[in-house]
Amino acid sequence: MLESELKRLGLQQAKLRKHGASLSSDGSPCEGEEAPWYSATSVVDNPSNLNWGISPDWSTIPSPTDDGGVRHLHGADWPPISLPATDGLSYDLSLLHGRRVIYAYPRTGQPGIPNPDGWDLIPGARGCTPQSCSFRDHFSELKACGVAHLFGLSTQSSDYQREAAARLHLPFPLLSDEHLTLTQALNLPTFEAGGMRLLKRCTFILNEGRIEHVFYPVFPPDESASAVLRWLLDQDRNP
């Protein structure tokens, strides 16, 4: 029943994306630093493959490797830290109930504004806009799989994040760890670029107040939501 519903939702989204790159909720292209790399791929109808629609070509981008940066986080408790979000609220994820998904990303670019020097050569740096779009496009499926809360997380300020949240029509908040409070408490993996300390891309699944699973490294970024969905479906089949 769950797989058939996910398939139906995915095929609807694939039809909407058939003639574009990654589309926002109003049908317009998902603009950002990665948009020119999109190329059409075939739409699949296999419910075990949740990567429908349009995918970019990542062959020219160096992929990240597992440097062990999150090994200490598997099964760890999420710290009681409140972070500001793009919806104007603050969230302490340790207090929320139900399963939560938090995808940490380096930074979203803005149309017309160049990225830091050498950005494309940093393994895993590029791809924040497609990753956010993937979670937006699979939001309904994630809810159907029992995800009570979904958040993006970066070290950018909430003011900066609001531009991306509005432009990409994200149906979930972005959390700001501008002061690195959470980053330091969890010892999250980071890197330096353009004078900024940025998060390496990783995705957390929390169950109540504990980290149930960590995806790291995350590549390609636009398949991040699909990987989470596959994991959730596997948990549903093998509780």
Image: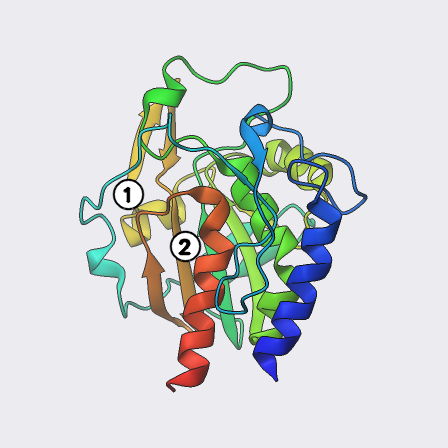
Label 1 sits on a secondary structure element that is loop
Residue at 48% from the left image edge and 35% from the top image edge: 127
Identify the amino acid type marked 1: Pro
- The residue where tag 2 is placed is 203
How far across and how far down the image is residue 34, in percent?
54, 28
Q: Quadrant of residue 209?
A: bottom left
As drawn, is 151 to the left or to the right of 13?
left
Residue at 32% from the left image edge and 68% from the top image edge: 77
Residue at 28% from the left image edge and 43% from the top image edge: 189
How far across and how far down the image is residue 206, in percent?
42, 68
Mark 2, other Cα within 10 Å: few <14 / some 14–19 / many ≥20:
many
Furthest residue toward right: 26
- The residue where tag 1 is placed is 189
Identify the amino acid type marked 2: Thr
As drawn, is 220 to the left or to the right of 184?
right
Residue at 79% from the left image edge and 42% from the top image edge: 27
Mark 1, other Cα within 10 Å: few <14 / some 14–19 / many ≥20:
some
The residues tagged by marks 2 and 1 sit, at their Cα atoms, a distance apart of 12 Å
Does 172 sit above or below residue 231? above
How far across and how far down the image is residue 170, in percent?
68, 48
As drawn, is 194 to the left or to the right of 40?
left
Label 2 sits on a secondary structure element that is strand
Quarter of the figure that contains the C terminus: bottom left
Does 220 sit above or below residue 75? above
Question: 175 or 34: which is nearer to us?
Answer: 34
Quarter of the figure that contains the N terminus: bottom right
Q: Of discs 2 and 1, which sits in the foreground? A: 2
Q: Is residue 201 visible?
A: yes
